Image (tube, coloured by chain):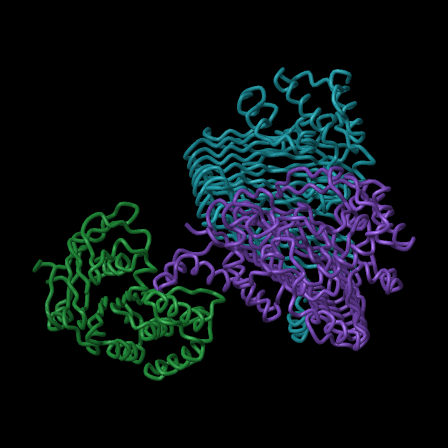
Chain colours: A green, B cyan, C purple
């Protein structure tokens, strides 16, 4: 589904953050990308989602057989790539429900499916809310405005559930959450596990992985993946911290 | 006279033209004589500003129009007890480098400059014209030709000071400029000054204005802040009850420099404090704060224009206005962000108290933005004292008058508290308290 | 919200006027010679068969205008207008304008399509001479009957002068005097036609009065005059304008709107202004210089202005409220968008005269392209206006680095018990917001439109429902091409 080959990326000021990433993610898999602060985790997510401010100066990214880097950000999203933001953005005055319906219908149009009317949309919303145990009041407010940190993250997971992406990238969705919120996020991710869907979780801590079992774990350091393994690697990291891995590299 | 009248002349300018013709100005070098003539011509063309011009919308100039205030050839004043009282009223208690101007003229016997380091030059503008004509000339020519009273000032100025701080120098003591008016005869005092803060220098200048009698003070000053310099400038206007005071400041801010301005308008019948800041270098910062406290038939305007011509600038303004009796106060503040001046962060606040049925306050905070990546905002409010707070104080046994005074003081003090240097802050606080004691009488 | 009734009425009135003037005047006299002088004013008044007092009123306005000079605004870049070159009276011509849609600017047609305007209405809006084929000839008559049962008068100004001269004479010019300003004086001297409405005591007007449903919707031209009177305890909501871009061969538009609210009456006046802004360089756009003012004459009366301004090359208007009645209320809600080379200088004046008067100002300005957008507003509290209250919020949004957003509030307080607050912010659409929307699959234009609609939400919700939906679409169309 996603093939990253020798990906180098730098900021517009010239600092190189990604220095040769190789990563292959297949449909049905859950990958965890771990690493210390400043290792390039969030940059990887941003580059994959197509955020401005980064320049890919080497390497390729193939998504569903297409050159991902050639697509604008909104097209990537309509092709099923979802990014759960580390810092979800506030958009004053724009109702959360309205926002989500606009997004879903943009994606449905893209796939040649009929748009959802208000009734259909609401039925899906209610079903997903129930699954995730989220209150409806969250949806009546403006997008992320006045949300607590936990509410913002819930909203991201809820949007993921609504948009049903092919590839979901979760950028530190677990950070700053209490245990209840973390469990809810984990439940949301687990519900999304499906044979035709891949999930990439970017995280600093092993905590989330106690609730969502990854197929593969990668350690990102200094802009490269320095080690890959199964979930036991995550446990090892938890015990030893990131230092020894660096030594091993 | 005939030499200058080959251009349109506004009627109200005529007496000034005639006075200029009588004035011999023997000491002036040729360039200055030429400059004065051109400035006078400009004034004659502009005349007095009309109330329809935005910058003069909120001030009444009729009295000045009807009765010309011409420069008087005053003798060098003798130090009287009245002057000594003025000095004591407005002077700083802490040690300072002090320069006293009486009727615009340098009074060495009242000044104390002997401790001044050799890297700092402070003296009268007359001396600077003789010794450093190029510096004075460049300052004069930096002024906009569209300001009628600055043009008039250029034609007539006789006094003022020049402060020049060498690069890298940090002055620990404040420089204190005391502008006194001896009150011998009705007339106008024109002073022109210049402060040059060299690169990475640091200094505080406190200018206080006081006087007695019937006079019109027209003061123009330029502040030049070199790259990385920090200048604090405090203005305290405590002019005599019948005085007119028009002060114009032009500040030019080089890269990463910082200007902290504060003004307290407490005395004078008609007072105008007009500050233009040009942020010419990237990353400069400008704080402009101030208070006007008006009663009786006082009228005061504070005008600020901050012109961001370079990126990354920051501006913070807090102005408090209080008017009671028949007084009229106005604040007009403009922040301009020019094309390309990205990342400017500017905020302006104008808060005002109208305390009596015949008092009036106007405020006009203005944003003019031509760049998109900016954070600019302003707020303005006019109202009365908070009834709930007043009641709360009275319920604790404080008299109505005392409670009002306390709340007004707290209101005005918020701006004074923004002065960073503690002794200076205390000095202004005490002046504020003193003014408030008689405000609502 | 259809324009077909308007078209219908227009055609009907054309034939009426054609009949009325057809026999008594020759063809040359249908149009006044260019220029403006007393003779022209007399000509216009005579053409309209006006009473003597109205002619005198127009002449007084003309004399005042002659002494005035066009205002000069620092922030508006305006080519000089030659008032003596213009023609001030021209009977509506059936053959003016393009012959068919094929002759109309394709850009304009594309916009109609985006706004979903039916084909026949597109012709009307683009000024194509239309055939008088209609399916619902009774619409206008039905409305008129229903309104007249309630005693509501709603007709053209011309008809009002003929049928209700006392009302017109009593109120005309009492809110905007002839010599109020340069453009109001010009309008007073030469106004062509406009709308008149009177809502009697205690009546709640059961429908939104609209220029669309105007009984006599003759093309009122560039000097429209509207007079609305809400008598004691009545209520009326009036809609003006149209979301589709309207073309007009007259570049200068100088309308005057006067509202009068008596005791306990309420007037809600909503405008969507979308005059042709000119091409991307601003060529051919309309100058819209309007004087709109409402007087809250009676106690507890209320006047509420809501405007969405997206059109015109230059817009200059300050819908204002004179709050004379004790406890009267004034409101101003505004969205103004400038794109390409458009310039807008708009805002309001709230004059607090009566006790306990309250006003609210909410202004949202959006600048894109090389647009210049200025909010200019005055809040004045007069000495007698005990306990007056005002709250003003002005927000500006910048899209791109070549546009400008300016905020110029004047706050003048003459009473110690007043409380006046003003807040303003200027910001740009953040990259983060755009990216967030794009990551969810919205393209850049939809993302901008969504964010802008959010930014304007508090104003749009003041519009009548069906207008609001159209206005949302309009915002999106107005901002086309503003993001790269």
Residue C34 in the figure: left or right of residue C409:
right
- Counting from the top left corner in percent of width and height, residue A211 is at 21, 78
- The image quarter containing residue A62 is bottom left
Q: Is residue B383 visible?
A: yes
- The front one of C418 and B220 is C418
Residue at coordinates 78% horizontally, 51% vertically from top-left? C191
Residue at coordinates 70% horizontally, 36% vertically from top-left? B217
- The image quarter containing residue B130 is top right
The N terminus of chain B, quarter of image: top right
Tell me how many marks there are: 0
Residue at coordinates 76% horizontally, 37% vertically from top-left? C84
- Counting from the top left corner in percent of width and height, residue C318 is at 68, 55
- Counting from the top left corner in percent of width and height, residue A199 is at 22, 70
Q: Classify A217 as above or below C278.
A: below
- Counting from the top left corner in percent of width and height, residue C338 is at 55, 51
- The front one of C161 and B332 is C161
Extreme residue in the left direction: A248
- The front one of C80 and B162 is C80
Q: Classify B102 as above or below B30.
A: below
- The front one of B381 and C472 is C472
Q: Is residue C360 visible?
A: no
Q: Classify B14 as above or below C168.
A: above
Residue at coordinates 69% horizontally, 35% vertically from top-left? B218
The C terminus of chain B, quarter of image: bottom right
């Amino acid at each position: 589904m996603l093939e990253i080959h020798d990906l180098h990326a730098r900021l517009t000021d010239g600092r190189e953050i990604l220095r040769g990433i190789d990563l292959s993610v297949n449909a049905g898999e859950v990958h965890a990308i771990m690493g210390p602060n400043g290792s390039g985790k969030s940059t990887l997510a941003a580059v994959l989602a197509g955020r401005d401010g980064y320049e890919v100066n080497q390497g390729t990214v193939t998504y569903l057989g297409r050159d991902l880097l050639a697509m604008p950000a909104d097209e990537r999203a309509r092709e099923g790539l979802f990014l759960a933001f580390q810092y979800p953005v506030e958009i004053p005055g724009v109702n959360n429900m309205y926002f989500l319906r606009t997004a879903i219908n943009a994606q449905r149009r893209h796939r040649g499916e009929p748009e959802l009317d208000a009734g259909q949309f609401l039925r899906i919303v209610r079903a997903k809310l129930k699954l995730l145990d989220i209150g409806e009041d969250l949806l009546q407010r403006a997008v992320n405005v006045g949300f607590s940190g936990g509410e913002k993250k819930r909203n991201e997971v809820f949007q993921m559930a609504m948009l049903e992406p092919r590839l979901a990238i979760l950028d530190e969705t677990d950070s700053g959450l209490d245990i209840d919120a973390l469990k809810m996020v984990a439940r949301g991710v687990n519900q999304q596990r499906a044979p035709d869907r891949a999930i990439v979780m970017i995280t600093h801590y092993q905590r989330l992985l106690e609730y969502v079992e990854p197929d593969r774990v990668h350690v990102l350091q200094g802009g490269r993946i320095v080690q890959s393994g199964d979930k036991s690697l995550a446990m090892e990291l938890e015990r030893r911290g990131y230092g020894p891995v660096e030594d091993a590299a | 006279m005939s030499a200058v009248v080959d251009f349109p002349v506004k009627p109200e300018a005529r007496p000034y033209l005639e006075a200029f013709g009588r004035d011999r100005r023997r000491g002036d070098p040729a360039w200055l004589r030429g400059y004065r003539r051109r400035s006078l011509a400009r004034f004659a063309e502009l005349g007095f500003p009309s109330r329809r011009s935005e910058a003069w919308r909120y001030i009444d100039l009729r009295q000045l129009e009807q009765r010309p205030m011409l420069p008087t050839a005053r003798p060098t004043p003798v130090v009287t007890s009245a002057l000594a009282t003025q000095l004591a009223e407005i002077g700083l208690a802490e040690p300072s480098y002090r320069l006293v101007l009486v009727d615009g003229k340098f009074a060495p016997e009242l000044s104390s400059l002997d401790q001044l380091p050799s890297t700092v030059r402070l003296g009268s503008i007359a001396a600077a014209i003789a010794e450093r004509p190029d510096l004075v000339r460049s300052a004069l020519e930096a002024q906009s030709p569209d300001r009628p009273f600055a043009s008039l000032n250029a034609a007539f100025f006789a006094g003022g000071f020049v402060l020049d701080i060498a690069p890298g120098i940090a002055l620990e003591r404040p420089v204190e400029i005391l502008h006194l008016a001896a009150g011998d005869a009705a007339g106008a005092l024109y002073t022109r000054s210049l402060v040059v803060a060299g690169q990475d220098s640091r200094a505080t200048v406190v200018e206080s204005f006081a006087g007695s009698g019937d006079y019109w003070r027209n003061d123009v000053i330029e502040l030049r802040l070199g790259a990385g310099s920090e200048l604090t400038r405090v203005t305290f206007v405590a002019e005599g009850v019948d005085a007119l005071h028009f002060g114009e400041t032009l500040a030019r801010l080089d890269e990463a420099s910082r200007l902290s301005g504060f003004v307290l308008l407490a005395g004078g019948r008609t007072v105008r404090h007009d500050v233009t800041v040009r942020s010419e270098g990237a990353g400069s910062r400008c704080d402009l704060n101030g208070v006007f406290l008006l009663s009786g038939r006082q009228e005061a305007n504070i005008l600020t224009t901050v012109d961001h011509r370079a990126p990354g600038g920051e501006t913070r303004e807090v102005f408090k206005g209080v008017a009671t009796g028949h007084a009229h106060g106005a604040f007009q503040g403009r922040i301009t962000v020019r094309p390309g001046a990205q990342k400017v962060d500017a905020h302006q606040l104008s808060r005002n108290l109208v305390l009596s049925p015949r008092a009036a306050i106007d405020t006009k905070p203005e944003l003019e933005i031509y760049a998109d990546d900016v954070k600019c905002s302003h707020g303005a409010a006019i109202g009365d004292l908070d009834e709930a707070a007043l009641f709360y104080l009275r319920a604790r046994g404080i008299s109505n008058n005392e409670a009002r005074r306390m709340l007004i003081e707290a209101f005005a003090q918020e701006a004074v508290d923004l002065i960073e240097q503690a002794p200076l802050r205390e000095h202004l606080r005490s002046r504020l308290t003193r003014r408030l004691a008689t405000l609502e009488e | 919200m259809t324009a077909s009734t308007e078209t219908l009425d227009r055609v009907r009135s054309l034939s009426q006027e054609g009949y009325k003037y057809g026999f008594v005047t020759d063809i040359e006299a249908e149009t006044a010679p260019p220029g403006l002088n007393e003779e022209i004013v007399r000509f216009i008044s005579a053409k309209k068969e006006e009473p003597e007092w109205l002619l005198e009123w127009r002449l007084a306005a003309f004399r005042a205008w002659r002494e005035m000079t066009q205002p000069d605004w620092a922030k508006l870049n305006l080519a000089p207008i030659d008032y003596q070159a213009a023609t001030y009276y021209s009977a509506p011509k059936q053959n003016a304008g393009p012959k068919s849609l094929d002759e109309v600017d394709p850009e304009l047609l594309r916009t109609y399509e985006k706004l979903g305007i039916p084909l026949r209405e597109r012709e009307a809006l683009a000024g194509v001479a239309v055939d008088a084929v209609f399916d619902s000839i009774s619409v206008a008559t039905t409305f008129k009957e229903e309104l007249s049962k309630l005693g509501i008068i709603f007709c053209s100004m011309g008809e009002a002068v003929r049928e209700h001269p006392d009302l017109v004479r009593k109120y005309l010019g009492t809110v905007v005097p002839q010599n109020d300003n340069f453009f109001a004086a010009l309008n007073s001297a030469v106004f062509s036609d406009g709308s008149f409405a009177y809502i009697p005591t205690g009546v709640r007007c059961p429908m939104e009065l609209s220029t669309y449903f105007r009984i006599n919707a003759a093309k009122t031209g560039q000097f429209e005059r509207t007079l609305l009177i809400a008598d004691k305890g009545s209520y009326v909501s009036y809609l003006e304008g149209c979301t589709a871009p309207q073309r007009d061969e007259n570049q200068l538009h100088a309308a005057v709107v006067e509202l009068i609210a008596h005791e306990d009456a309420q007037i809600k006046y909503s405008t969507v202004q979308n005059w042709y802004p000119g091409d991307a360089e601003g060529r051919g756009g309309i100058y819209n210089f309007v004087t709109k003012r409402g007087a809250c004459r009676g106690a507890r009366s209320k006047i509420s202005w809501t405007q969405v301004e997206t059109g015109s090359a230059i817009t200059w208007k300050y819908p204002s409220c004179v709050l004379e009645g004790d406890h009267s209320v004034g409101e101003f809600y505004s969205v103004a968008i400038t794109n390409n080379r458009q310039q807008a200088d708009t805002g309001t004046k709230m004059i607090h005269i009566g006790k306990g008067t309250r006003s609210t100002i909410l202004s949202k300005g959006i600048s894109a392209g090389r647009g210049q957008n200025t909010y200019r507003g005055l809040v004045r509290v007069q000495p007698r206006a005990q306990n007056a209250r005002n709250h003003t919020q002005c927000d500006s949004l910048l899209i791109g680095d070549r546009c400008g957003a300016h905020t110029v509030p004047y706050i003048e307080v003459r009473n110690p018990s007043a409380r006046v607050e003003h807040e303003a912010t200027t910001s740009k659409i953040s990259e983060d917001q755009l990216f967030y929307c794009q990551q969810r699959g919205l393209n850049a234009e939809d993302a901008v439109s969504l964010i802008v609609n959010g930014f304007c939400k508090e104003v749009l919700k003041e519009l009548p429902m069906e207008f609001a939906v159209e206005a949302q679409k309009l915002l999106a169309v107005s901002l086309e091409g503003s993001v790269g």
